[in-house]
C-alpha cells in the first residue's frame, strides 16, 4: 500500500524541522513538501496534491491557517484534506477551522502515535479531534444556541445567499452602515470573524434553513 503523502505548513522553521524528523520515522507517511506561510501552503497543495496538509493556525504575515484551509479544501477534486496541528484550542479557533473545512483538529501536545493515526484518518476523510478539542465541541453542541434578533437572522440568510453588504442593504431596505453594525453583533454572538464562518456556524447551530 502506498504511503500517505503530506504537506507541512508552519511558520516556525524549528517546528517544521522537528516534524520532518518525526514523520521521517514513520514508513507509511511521505512528506512531499513544507510551507512557511498560508499562501505558500495553498500554492504547494495545488501543485503537489498531497493526501493531507498539516496546518498550523497562526502563520505570521499574510493569510492565516483558517483562510489557507478554506482555499485548499476548495481546490478542484480531489482536494487535499486538512489536519490542523496547533497549540491553540479556543472555541473561536476550533469553530473557524472546522467551518473552513478542516477534517481534524490536533494539538501539538499529542503523542507521536496519535499524530500518525490522525494523519492516516484524515487521508481517508475521517475526523480526529484531540480530547480537549472534542470536549469543547461537545460542550458547544450541548449548549444553548446563540440568540439572534429577527433582523440579524434576516441578514444571516442574505449572507448564506452570498450577498455583499450593499446588496443586503438594498434587499432589507436598510443602510450599509446598519448592515455592518448587525454583522459585528452576529460575529460576536457566533464567535467568528468572517462571513463564511458565520454561515458555517449558523448552519451547524441550525439557525438557517
Image (tube, rainbow, N blue to C red):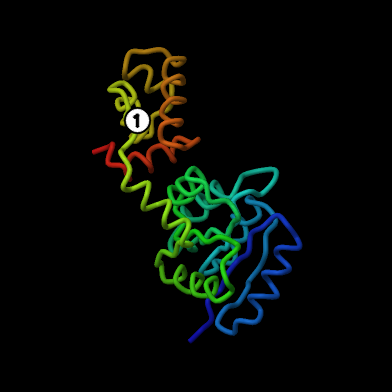
Q: Considering only vertical position in the picture, is 176 above or below 132?
A: above
Give left or right: position of 51 versus 127.
right
In the image: residue 112, left or right of residue 124: right
Name the residue nearer the viewer: 15 or 155: 15
Please indicate, yes or no, whether residue 46 appears anywhere in the rendered image. Answer: no
Is 112 placed above or below 53 here?
Answer: below
Q: Is residue 97 above or below residue 119?
A: above
Name the outermost residue toward the left.
209
Residue 165 to residue 111: above or below: above
Q: Which residue is mark 1?
A: 156
- Mark 1, secondary structure of its residue: helix
Residue drawn at x 42%, y 15% is: 178
Residue with the most extreme right position: 14
Residue in view at x 63 percent, y 73 percent: 31
Q: Position of residue 24 (x, y in %)?
A: 66, 79
Answer with left or right where residue 184 lies relative to residue 145.
right
Report the front residue among 23 and 196: 23
At 66% from the left and 68% from the top, the residue drawn is: 33
> Badge 1, how many Cα within 10 Å: few under 14, some, many 20+?
many
Amino acid at each position: 500500500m502506498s504511503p500517505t503523502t503530506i504537506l507541512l505548513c508552519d511558520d516556525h522553521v524549528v517546528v517544521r524541522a522537528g516534524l520532518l524528523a518525526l514523520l521521517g520515522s514513520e514508513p507509511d507517511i511521505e512528506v512531499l513538501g513544507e510551507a512557511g506561510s498560508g499562501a505558500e501552503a495553498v500554492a504547494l497543495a495545488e501543485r503537489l496534491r498531497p493526501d493531507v496538509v498539516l496546518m498550523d493556525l497562526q502563520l505570521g504575515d499574510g493569510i492565516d491557517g483558517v483562510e489557507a484551509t478554506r482555499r485548499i479544501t476548495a481546490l478542484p477534486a480531489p482536494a487535499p484534506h486538512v489536519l490542523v496541528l496547533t497549540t491553540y484550542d479556543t472555541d473561536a479557533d476550533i469553530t473557524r477551522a472546522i467551518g473552513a473545512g478542516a477534517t481534524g483538529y490536533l494539538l501539538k501536545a499529542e503523542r507521536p502515535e496519535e499524530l500518525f493515526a490522525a494523519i492516516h484518518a484524515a487521508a481517508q476523510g475521517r475526523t480526529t479531534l484531540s480530547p480537549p478539542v472534542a470536549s469543547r465541541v461537545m460542550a458547544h453542541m450541548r449548549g444553548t444556541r446563540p440568540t439572534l434578533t429577527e433582523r440579524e437572522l434576516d441578514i444571516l440568510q442574505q449572507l448564506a445567499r452570498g450577498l455583499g453588504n450593499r446588496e443586503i442593504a438594498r434587499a432589507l431596505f436598510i443602510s450599509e452602515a446598519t448592515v455592518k453594525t448587525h454583522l459585528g453583533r452576529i460575529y460576536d454572538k457566533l464567535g467568528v470573524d468572517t462571513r463564511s464562518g458565520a454561515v458555517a456556524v449558523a448552519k451547524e447551530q441550525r439557525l438557517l434553513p
